Image: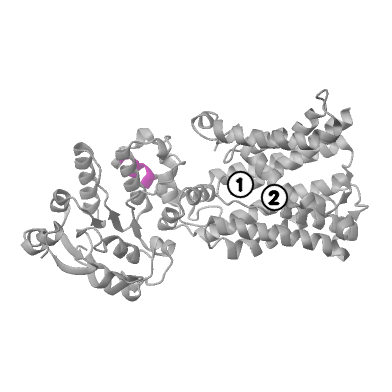
Amino acid sequence: MTTYIINLAILIGINAILAVTLNFILGYAGIFSLAHAIFFGIGAYTAAIAAMKFGADFAVATAAGMVISGVISLALALPALRVRGEYFVAASLGLQMLAVTVFSEWKSVTGGIGGLIGIPPARLFGFDVSEPVLFLGLTIACLAVILIIIRALVRSSFGRSLKAIRDDETAASALGKNVALLKTLAVMVSSSFAAVAGSLFTFYLSFINVESFVLEVSVQIIAMVIIGGTATLLGPVIGAVIVLLLPALLTYLPYLPPTEIGSIQQMIYGLAMVLLMIFRPSGLWGYGSDSQKRGEP
Amino acid sequence: MSGEILFQADNISKTFGGLKAVDNVSFALRAGIVTTLVGPNGAGKTTLFNAMTGHLVPDQGAVTFLGKSILGLPRWKVARLGIGRTFQDLKLFSHMTVLENVTTATESGSWLWQTGGRASKAARIERIERALAATQLQRRRDTRAVDLSYAERKFLSIARIMASGARLWLLDEPASGLDRSSYDRFLTVLRNEVTSGVTICIIEHNLDIVQSISDRIAFLDQGKLLAEGDPKTILSDPALAAIYFGERA
């Protein structure tokens, strides 16, 4: 039971990193990306290859994933962010589909559909951190560092510029904001930090394949952000907890046949999203006067 | 300083489909005065503003600021040169507080931090506080823009441009919808800024405001600049009045 809870907590931590990093662009910059799972995947594959082929430890493998994810995000951001929001959504969807094909077909690098197996246990500065409790500590530490950095960024002039762009691009540019550059930087920061989640995922499971980085995963991360509350620091963390705990809790409901849990879960997600948009459009931890009282950025 | 040509437009034209919104307009904005663009709806005033600030590129003509061409520059570069503008629909950053709206106007750098160190930060803070004080928004500094009254939003748009440090202000119908006391306060703010060296160009329909604030008036109709001169001359011209009030032959 304890192992199960730790396992769940690690997965919640990894998904919380994904939700927090997506929220950085979705909530604070108004950039709606359908490709966040791809940067999760790039981080995961890069960390796996770095560990398997070069014996890299967690820190080096994660750094490599962040750099590669950040650079590849430029391929999406540079052309797509010069146009208005809906075109970026379409471009990110295109990247999501393209990258999934690459993940599944580039067998010599990604292992194709079968994925990569035999990823060595996580080591950090010479210490084995693959023990579940230690790995949970590592996951929480990564989440905490990312939250602290994002909090600092959001409260900086960079964060204010992103929020200005989110609220009105035309007015932001009339005040001297280089909108395309700021949005590109935001996507790069978000994608780089998403790669940290990928690296954690890789080292925790010791196995990855394309199934973990498909469009449904990107949509699930968006759901975490919206359910928790966009443009809030802790909302996406709460969203990740709810989205991941829901299926786990459903398994304890009596009279539910195990074969039907998946479809019931989908119905509950859908219903929750509809009710949330009606009664609390800014999410459970949503911004507004309440969040300002809580001191949210 | 007053009298120096700050901004110059030469033979600007802009066509949308078959409509010539601005037709071969040339005019200059002199430093330290208020120039008002007047004319009936559809005269091309806002299009001219957009062409002056890089929000659209004219089909022909030259635009210079402080003697240097700004034609074709992206609007963020135009803004960083010292040309600020407001919009008819205000375009405030609705979910940001008053303080954030004004603060971000002082931060034009695109990187993760602002350059210039402590001295630059102190200067920015001084500009922010001065803008909030001049527009009487200090007590509303933690209120989101969306929660302000209409008059307060108007003043916030002025506070933002004031904090930006722009040398030339282009204000698109800034006083429309203001009550009498807000309107008087608004004129005082503008006069104080002009006294301290800011150059202002306003689009305005209210002739009371035009009369009380303008040093020069440019009259546009159907995309053409029909007349330019001191307020007394322009406002007493019966032909222009007929056009303005829709009584053309």
> For the N terminus of chain A, which image quadrant?
top right
Residue ID for mark 2: A193
Q: In this view, does B193 lie to the left or right of A109?
A: left
Any magenta on residue B128?
yes
Mark 2: give few (<14), some (14-19) or many (20+) Cα within 10 Å: many
Disc 1 residue type (three-letter): Phe
For the residue pair A258 and B58, the one nearer the viewer reads as A258
Task: Using the image, determine if residue B142 lies above or below residue B194.
Answer: above
Residue ID for mark 1: A24
Q: Disc 2 on helix, strand or loop? A: helix
Disc 2 residue type (three-letter): Phe
Any magenta on residue B111?
no
Residue at 50% from the left image edge and 33% from the top image edge: A288
Residue at 56% from the left image edge and 44% from the top image edge: A154
Residue at 85% from the left image edge and 53% from the top image edge: A209
- Where's residue A271, x and y in %? 65, 34
Mark-to-mark CA distance, 2 and 1: 10 Å
| Residue B200 in which image quadrant | bottom left
Q: Which mark is residue B211?
A: none
Chain of the residue on which disc 2 is drawn: A
Residue A283 appears in the picture as rendered: no
The prevailing secondary structure element of the residues shown in magenta is helix
Mark toward the start of the polypeptide (2 vs 1): 1
Q: In this view, does B207 lie to the left or right of B31?
A: left
Please give the count of numbered marks on the rendered protein: 2
Question: What are the residue bounds of the magenta stretch?
Answer: B126-133
Say if labels 2 and 1 share a chain: yes
| Residue B226 in which image quadrant | bottom left
- Where's residue A130, x and y in %? 89, 42
Check contact, mark 2 vs mark 1: CB within 8 A.
Answer: yes
